[in-house]
Amino acid sequence: MRMDVMEMTETPTITEKSPAKSGSNIPGMMENKVKFRSTDVDVFYGDNRAIKSLNVDILDKEVTAFIGPSGCGKSTFLRCLNRMNDTIDICRVTGDIRLDGVDINDKEIDPVLLRARVGMVFQKPNPFPKSIYDNIAYGPKIHGLAKTKPDLDVIVEKSLRRAALWDEAKDRLLEPGTGLSGGQQQRLCIARAIATSPEVLLMDEPCSALDPIATAQIEELIDELRARLAVVIVTHSMQQAARVSQKTAFFHLGELVETGETDQIFTNPVDPRTESYITGRIG
Amino acid sequence: MTDTFDSAKFYSSVETHQRLRRRKRAETRLKLYGIGAIFLASLALIALLWSVVGKATGALSESYVTLPVSLEQAKLDPDGNGDYKTILRANFTGLTKDTLKATFSTVKDRRLKRQLYDVVSGGAAFELAETVASDPGLLGQTIDFRFLASDVTDLYLKGAYGSLEEQPVHGKLSISEVGGKLTITSTSNDFAAILATVKRHLILDANRLKRQAAMQDNGYEVFFRRAGETTDEDERARLLILSDERAAERDRLLAQAAELVTRASGARGEEPLSDENRSVLIRVAGGWVKLTAVNRANAVGEILLPLNGPVENSGEWELMFTELPEVARKVSDHQIAWIEHLKSEGRTDTVFNTRFFTAGDSREPELAGVWGAIVGTFWTMLVTFALAFPIGVLTAIYLEEFAPKNRLTHLIEVNINNLAAVPSIVFGLLGLAVFLTVFGVPRSAPLAGGIVLALMTLPTVIIAARAAIRAVPPSIRDAALGVGASKIQTSFHHVLPLAMPGILTGTIIGMAQALGETAPLILIGMVAFIVEIPTGITDSATVLPVQIFRWSDFPERAFEARTAAAICVLLVFLVCMNALAVFLRRKIEIRW
């Protein structure tokens, strides 16, 4: 485990910008491998079909933004990716979602391990009412990522550093995480999510409860995080989507209307509905 | 509202202002009702505490009578080897009686002897035996031993039977005995007041008889009138007989009343003082005399406690009324004389009653304590907690976090809620029928009581725990599931700790409810008379509320104070448990 962590910290500068830049600048060029491939995904809440025959690919080491008006199914689809919808009794997911080519809805796949590989950050900062240290250490502890206390200490420090919270939190690790400010709490939640070394990070409107300065910090953080993992972010702010993402997917009434390079979606959308939405006529 | 509606005019109109005033008046009224309700409730609470605590104070002290007792080696330890068990088996009850007889040597009558023995507690002999057996060196000596006073003595010393009211005396007292009749004379008219009182009572009695006679007279007239109206011969005859009976009764009552009036008017000088009158006692020359009849100038009496010598023109005497007539109190006039005598010699003392808090139950109020019930309560509550808490919490977790929402779980939910409303005695019947009869759980044991009370408490615990679990924000569950915790880990690592203050509060409220429960325990035999302190959950035991129930049913007056004191102990228990609930909630509540 210690090796793993060292690796993570040693690599950043090399992979930092290059793939994303090329990915965003040359349309259609797929350098990054597909992390998530969804085919014909339908989601039902009881009899209500919330998502209709959705096909989308999510690439590694890129930020994919889901935009669309409220109730269009962005968050619902996001929660399919780590099977959080399992916890809702009336929710039923059909279709095929593959992580690295493996069907995540397969009976063999344990959602517990899936969620360790696909981390999630929620709309409202929701740290456990425990110390900052325990918040981050909880995931590694239950997954057995650290055998000893020093191992755990290393993971906690790396996670906090990667979430840009170390400098603010290092002197108060044993204080409750709920005592932090809203932006700090959200970064703590990000640190908690990346502590289990996930390959994908799902973010469900992570900045909607934050002020502009905290938002800017989180966006900066997202940009750094994509060096090592795929990020999927649901957002209502088109400026945010434009700022942080390389790919954008536009959802409308449970359908995926258009997906593509962020620059292309915002400057030259193909579908008239996308154009209406980004110019502010619907939504 | 039309377009022409004028807001400014409407809101400044007289009607609007009147409506506003009405609203304010209604608010004020409501506030007053609320204050009134709180005031009434506080008043009721204060009255309750006042009466309970007021009565309980009597149980907080106990009295002792110190008497010289000669411990004869030959009687108590004939072998002379000072063996503990031999001495313990010696006849100390007899020795106690002998000691009392030696102190009041003039008591010969059997009835009086029984009264005399009743001055000290039946348990005093055992204490004397214990003292001597553990210190055989005392044998052969005469020691001053503090005998525990009986409930009657104790209550008298505490004034429960009223105090002696001393009357002012003016004359000098002479007592002469002629032919076994004790005549008491005073140089002044000191007995006139007593005679007047007696005669006033006679008049009152006469009036009462006259009222009864008037009722009989009324009945006579009614029957006589009906007899005149009826046409049926048989019926008339029957009514006439009835009216004659009424008339006879009327005449008898009137005659009695007339006799009483005659007596009151003083035609006959001497009036007997029956035991329905307040007793009149005279303390003179180191002894006690009770008046049995009174005249205008002198009185007739009997000796309660022998005098030192003849009394001739003595100015040193006291005349006292008891507060209650002898029939209305358990302490007899003789006992009053003996106790007062011991008191005047400084041989009685009253100390804090530690026995009440350390002893088990007893038929003798002065020996009874609540410790057995407290320990029984502790064991019972332990069993209740050990069963109700884990089962209740696990049920709540399952229903809230794991159970599918289908018909079956819905049915279970409804039934749990209904169980909370089932009368507790039904649980007692269940315990009797199932646990005692089928499973053979020992009768009267805290184990059986605890199981029954746990059943009773379970719905409360489950409902409280479910509410507490539901109150944990779902974002915490999402957070835990999001980092890959399984459902069980989420429940036990995150949800349960956050719900724990609420769960504990609910559990303690349920336990407090169980603590005050009597009915189901009576059914499973915890109402038995148990003297030993229980040492485990399978020993026979009783609990505080059942102890209170039992004592409240005992005829001895001294149990009244003990019942009140046991209620206070129970209240202290309840307050402590609620304080614990508040403390735990404050201590482990996590805010976010």
Image (cartoon, rainbow, N blue to C red):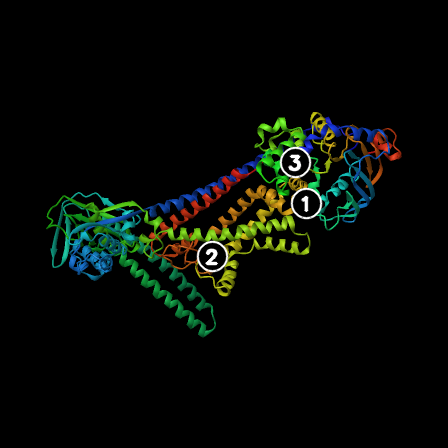
Dot 2 falls on which chain? B
Nearest to the observer: residue A241 or residue B565: A241
User: Is B544 situated left or right of B422 in this image?
Assistant: left
Tag 3 residue? A3
Label 2: few (<14), some or many (≥20) within 10 Å? Answer: many
Q: Residue furthest front?
A: A3
Q: Are marks 1 and 2 on the same chain?
A: no
Is there CB contact under 8 Å for labels 1 and 2? no
Q: Name the mark nearer the viewer: 1 or 2.
A: 1
Regarding residue B370, the answer to whether it shows in the image is no
Q: Foreground mark, 1 or 3? A: 3
Q: CA distance from mark 2 to mark 3?
A: 60 Å
Q: Residue B574 placed where, x, y %? A: 46, 46
Residue type, label 2: Gly
Q: Quick check: B527 above or below A86?
A: below
Horizontal and vertical percent position of residue A263: 84, 29
Q: Quadrant of residue B478?
A: top right
Which chain is home to disc 1? A
**Residue to which mark 1 is pinned:** A112
Image quadrant for the C terminus of chain B?
A: top right
Question: Which mark sits nearer the N-terminus, 1 or 3?
Answer: 3
Disc 2 marks which residue? B449
